[in-house]
Image (cartoon, rainbow, N blue to C red):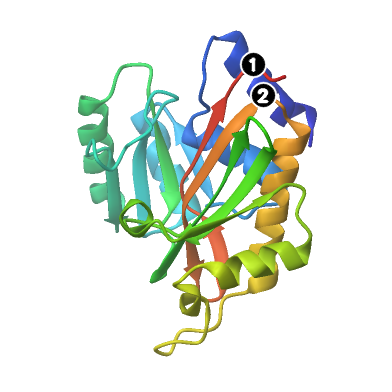
Amino acid sequence: MSEKEIHLIEKALGEGRKTLSEHESKQLLAAYGIPVTREVEIKEAEDLTDVARDIGYPLVMKGCSPDLTHKTEKGLVRIGIRNDDEARDAFISLKEELASESTILVQEMIQGQRELVMGLTRDPQFGPCVMFGLGGIFTEILRDISFRVAPLEKWDALEMMEEIKGHRILENVRGLPSADKDALAKILIKLGEIGLENEEVEEIDVNPIILQGSKPIAVDALVILGKGR
């Protein structure tokens, strides 16, 4: 991990924060090679058009701040933005609902029908534990998840995928390609590494990870910090 990503954690703790923003969280994940959405954080409307066209429509736009942990429930997410006019309208409406210090996250819209959840929690007895399961709106409803204590080997990660009741979602179903289990396994292994190498990281929630075709991409993420051990 580079000094930039270490600085993300140190900066947040120095400001008395216990969370990284979504954008900061994804920067940390990306530093470990975890695939995340292409996105840019902006503050001013004049930056919007160039950023939106560079990423490419359709877009998703979100309010972004370390204090915003449930953006969808708070109505701070706009999806399926198709052109400059819609992007401008979304920017204005989000700004009206956000605190002045909040920014707008402009990101590519990942197309996929299957959503997964992955994460990390720091158990008082076992230390960093990695989680895998069904994501999106089904995470809290079904609680279809499995855990392993870090560090993980590839066979650990593959076993986790087989343990959930909905494991067939990763197979070739209804014309959808089989999930790239090697790529999924790498993400689970890397989440364990983040926990082992950064004692200040108490929890990571990556939800959803969308399968775009066979490839997993982290669409939203939250990193919760502590003081370390």
Of residues 201 and 41, the one drawn nearer to the viewer in this rendering: 201
**Residues at marks 1 and 2, CA–CA distance in whole angstroms:** 5 Å
Of residues 100 and 123, the one drawn nearer to the viewer in this rendering: 123
Can you tell which mark lies on residue 200? 2
Q: Which residue is mark 1?
A: 227
| Residue in view at x 70 percent, y 70 percent | 182
- Residue 200: x and y in percent read 67, 24
| Residue in view at x 21 percent, y 27 percent | 97
Of residues 4 and 155, the one drawn nearer to the viewer in this rendering: 155
Q: Quadrant of residue 8?
A: top right
Give the residue furthest to the front: 125
Q: Is residue 109 left or right of residue 125?
A: left
- Residue 214: x and y in percent read 56, 75
| Residue in view at x 66 percent, y 56 percent | 187
- Mark 2 surroundings: few (<14), some (14-19) or many (≥20) residues within 10 A: many
Quadrant, the N terminus: top right
Helix, strand or loop at label 2? It is: loop
Above or below, 153 against 20 in this view is below
Above or below, 112 against 82 in this view is below
Helix, strand or loop at label 1? It is: loop
Quadrant, the C terminus: top right
Mark 1 and mark 2 residues within 8 Å of each other at the beta carbon: yes
Kind of residue sitting beneath label 2: Glu
